[in-house]
Amino acid sequence: MSSPILEPGQIEASATTPPFVQLPPDGQFRFRAERLEKLADGHAMGEYLALMARVARAQQQVLDAPPDVPALAAGDLDAAYHHDMPPLAVDTLVQTAGWQTLLDAWLDAFAAEQPTPAAAVSEALAALRDADGETRKAWAQALLGGRFGDVPAALAPFLGAALQLAWRYWLGEVDADRIREREDQTLCPCCGSLPVAGVIRHRRPIDGVRYLMCSLCATEWHYVRLKCSHCLSTKELDYLHFDDAPYGVKAEACPECHTYLKQLYLEQAPEGEVVSADLASLDLDLRLDEQGYRRRAPNLLLIPGGQETS
């Protein structure tokens, strides 16, 4: 790992105001799967990355041809926009049956994508399929609430994948133009979840602009650089990385709250994708943990056993 470095002083390269919210593309999961497959080749965690690639392909398959899921109530969405609340609030939608319908569809799609999974995977999927609705909901509430110790570790990434799929599906009903920017928005404006990482854009008109990407619905929202996305401190942040900065990833570490958030620099990794880059760079997390920094950002495809977010 290199010595801490200070981010260049040029914060915004664009002369125009960047859009506050950017919704993910329709082929998001397909692109993630392709990236995971490339990263798996020769990687120490290659088998896991390849497994998550199949998970993402199944997510895309269901998103392209979803089951019948009731539409969200227009009145509820209007009220959320009016009061500047997340239209896909986790606490509300996790109570509905729609995400469990999408979970079952994802389980079917994944079984077709990987017909002969390893024994541990097969057992986790069976537990998820056979659990009753209330048990599933309790697991989902724990997972989305950061209480990872309350979720069976083996099935957590698969439950996380299904929840990502559900909220990404519901994102199709969101009118991004009605979401108003609030200063220091540290949680996703669409669903209220924590970001998984930041991404530094590299093409005009938002060249050099930093967005945070939601760990659940994959919405990206603009957040100024050189400010901690946890405690809002503007005290000199450290940018930590291995010498060759593999995968275009650096960690923005705050000396005030001792948390960090990874950043994907697309100028260094033009084909990069946030979730896959995060999974491929877990060695950086280990090094930061040794230095006393705490990760607050969850990756729902890889849950730290027993660790909680706050």
Image (cartoon, rainbow, N blue to C red):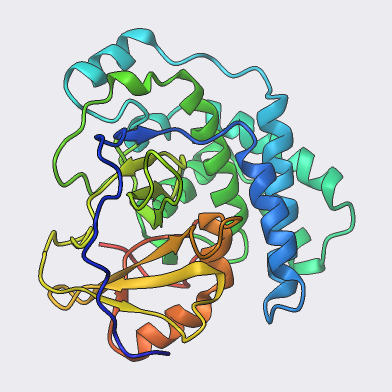
Asked if one can make out residue 39 in the rendered structure from this viewpoint, the answer is: yes
Q: Quadrant of residue 95?
A: top left
Q: Position of residue 222 (x, y in %)?
A: 29, 43
| Marker count (numbered) | 0
Q: Position of residue 242 (x, y in %)?
A: 46, 85
Towards the viewer: 72 or 293: 293
Q: Quadrant of residue 27?
A: top right
In this picture, residue 180 sits left or right of residue 141: left
What residue is at 30 percent from the left and 40 percent from the top? Answer: 192
Q: Is residue 90 above or below residue 232?
A: above
Towards the viewer: 17 or 119: 17
Q: Is residue 183 above or below residue 262?
A: above
Q: Quadrant of the C terminus?
A: bottom left
Q: Position of residue 187 (x, y in %)?
A: 27, 46
Asked if one can make out residue 97 in the rendered structure from this viewpoint, the answer is: no
What residue is at 21 percent from the left and 60 percent from the top? Answer: 230
Towards the viewer: 228 or 93: 228
In this picture, residue 49 sits left or right of residue 288: right
Q: Position of residue 243 (x, y in %)?
A: 47, 86
In this picture, residue 271 sits left or right of residue 284: right
Q: Quadrant of residue 148?
A: bottom left
What residue is at 77 percent from the left and 72 percent from the top? Answer: 41
Q: Quadrant of the N terminus?
A: bottom left
Towards the viewer: 52 or 16: 16
